[in-house]
Image (cartoon, rainbow, N blue to C red):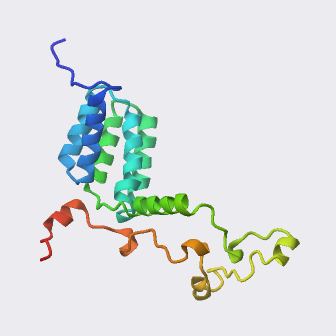
Amino acid sequence: MQTKAPLYDKSGEEHYNVVSAFIKSMRTSDVDASLYWLARMLEAGEDPLFIARRMVVFASEDVGLADVQALPLATAVKDAVHFVGLPEARINLAHGVAYLASAPKSNASYAGFEAAAAEVRTTGALAVPEHLRNAPTGLMKRLGYGRGYVSPHRDAKQAATLRYLPDGVRNKSFLPHSERGKRPSTTEAAKRKPES
């Protein structure tokens, strides 16, 4: 009775404020703040699987290609939370949060998908190039479906010369250009001197 419960209404504004602070702390690579907001949620009785789901999304949306082990780790944390349950699952959550907050960050795959989705909404359902079409019947083969397709397992150089986008978006690029989609983490970017 004498312990003051943290202000936290699972369906109210403070719930969303705390979750927002949690995600933004991990995104900025502030491990201490990330662990604090995790503790705030758990001490207030938040469903640990809700937190784990947010971490799984974060692993792809904010860490992404900068550390491809983030998603398997976040999924493993979700499984551990489900298997172990509270109170021990707090250790699994803290492990995952510390890893995700410390990881380099890239939202390139998320940004690339959003750009591709915007293009689809703009240009609609463009025709699949004939060489990429499935040809399970003789008629489809006679119509040219699949003709000219080369598997990269058979000839990687030849396969790389084919086009894989429809005509209307042939020269479009969706994934931001950088090494495997990497972008410097927020902390790395902050260390760099601005270009003059």
Is residue 42 among what the camera can see?
no
Q: Is residue 170 left or right of residue 56?
A: right
Q: Is residue 136 visible?
A: yes
> Is residue 78 placed above or below 67 in the rendered structure?
above
Residue under the point 27% across and 52% down: 27
Image check: 149 left or right of 55? right
Q: Quadrant of residue 84?
A: top left
Give the image location of residue 45, x and y in percent: 32, 26
**Which quadrant of the figure has residue 160?**
bottom right
Q: Residue furthest right?
A: 138
Task: Report the front residue among 126 and 32.
Answer: 126
x 67%, y 68%: residue: 127
Q: Position of residue 31 (x, y in %)?
A: 21, 49
- In the displayed structure, 103 sits above or below 17; it is below
* Picture quarter with the N terminus: top left
Along the viewing direction, whichever of 81 and 109 lies nearer the viewer: 109
Q: Which residue, as the protein is rendered here, is positioned at the far top?
A: 1
- Residue at (25% x, 62% y) in the render: 185
Residue 103 x, y percent position in the rendering:
29, 58
Q: Nearer the viewer, residue 190 or 170?
A: 170
> Residue 60: percent from the left, percent from the top?
41, 55
Quarter that holds the C terminus: bottom left
Q: How many marks?
A: 0
The answer to whether 167 is drawn above or below residue 184 in the figure is below
- Please give the name of the residue rendered at 15% of the width and 70% of the height, measured from the top-left corner: 192
